[in-house]
Image (spheres, grey):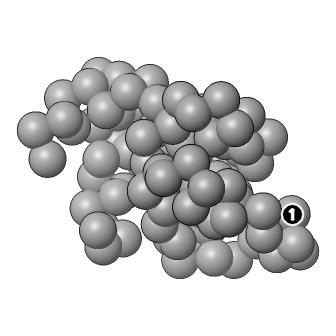
Amino acid sequence: MNEKEVLDLIEIARETGKIRKGINETTKAVERGQAKIVAVAGDIDPPEIAMHIPALCEEKKIEFCKISSKSELGRAAGISVGTSAVAVLDLGEGKKK
């Protein structure tokens, strides 16, 4: 999946499904096996705070995507500030995609 498709899915899931925002909430969703898709911003500072997420996603066989900026990810998640990570728990209408 490319960045645009993932951002579109996050917007759809935000309105018709279920998402979690932030490193901690995303990590919990992945560890519990609830996440379907995980997106992490590429401009996190320091980057070490999210280094564990790709490995966790691989272990749990969850789709992982890197998004270029926190602000784009935050906008897709429906918040006015940037967010470092988003986990989609329920795709809602996005299941068709």
In the image, residue 65 above or below residue 35: below
Residue 58's x, y, as percent?
56, 61
Q: Which residue is depicted at the point 34% across and 42% down?
A: 11
Residue 45 in sight in this render: no
Residue 77's x, y, as percent?
49, 42
Q: Which residue is depicted at the point 48% across and 51% down?
A: 62
* Left or right of 40 in this view: 24: right
87 or 10, nearer to the observer = 87
Which residue reaches farthest left?
96
Residue 64's x, y, as percent?
49, 61
Q: Which residue is depicted at the point 31% across and 32% down?
A: 91
Identify residue type, mark 1: Ile
Q: Quarter of the image containing the N terminus?
A: bottom left
Q: Which residue is depicted at the point 67% across and 55% down?
A: 56
Q: Residues within 10 Å of mark 1 (few under 14, many from 20)?
A: few
Tag 1 residue = 49
In the image, residue 6 above or below residue 3: above
